[in-house]
Amino acid sequence: MNFHFIRSLVCLISMLTLFSCEQKKEEQELEKVMYYLQMTSKELNNGMKSVEYLKEYQKQKELIFITIKP
C-alpha cells in the first residue's frame, strides 16, 4: 500500500509539473502576441501620423501654389 501511495504521489507531482510548464509556455506565447500587437499598434499609429503629415503637406503645397499663381 505504501508503494502505491508513493507512486501515485510521484505521478501527481509530475502531472502538476507538466501542467505548470505548459502554463508557462502559454504565458510566454501570450506575452509574445501582446508584444507583437503593441508593436503593430505603434507602427499603425506612426503610419497614420505619416499619412496625416503627408495630407497636411499636400494642403500647404496647394495653398502655396494658389497664393503664388494669381
Image (cartoon, grey):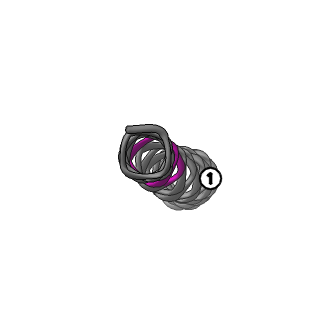
Report the magenta residues as a range.
50-54
Q: Main secondary structure of the magenta part?
A: helix
**21 sits to left or right of 30:** right
Report how many numbered discs are placed on residues in the image: 1
Q: Is residue 30 visible?
A: no
Q: Is residue 48 visible?
A: yes
Residue 14 magenta-highlighted: no
17 or 52: nearer the eye? 52
Which residue occupies the extreme front position in the image? 70
Residue at label 1? 32
Query: Residue 46: x and y, percent?
Result: 52, 56
Query: Residue 12: x and y, percent?
Result: 48, 51
Quadrant the C terminus occupies: top left
29 or 57: nearer the eye? 57
- Identified by mark 1, the residue type is Lys
Query: Residue 52: x and y, percent?
Result: 38, 47
Determine the residue positioned at 61% across, 57% down: 28
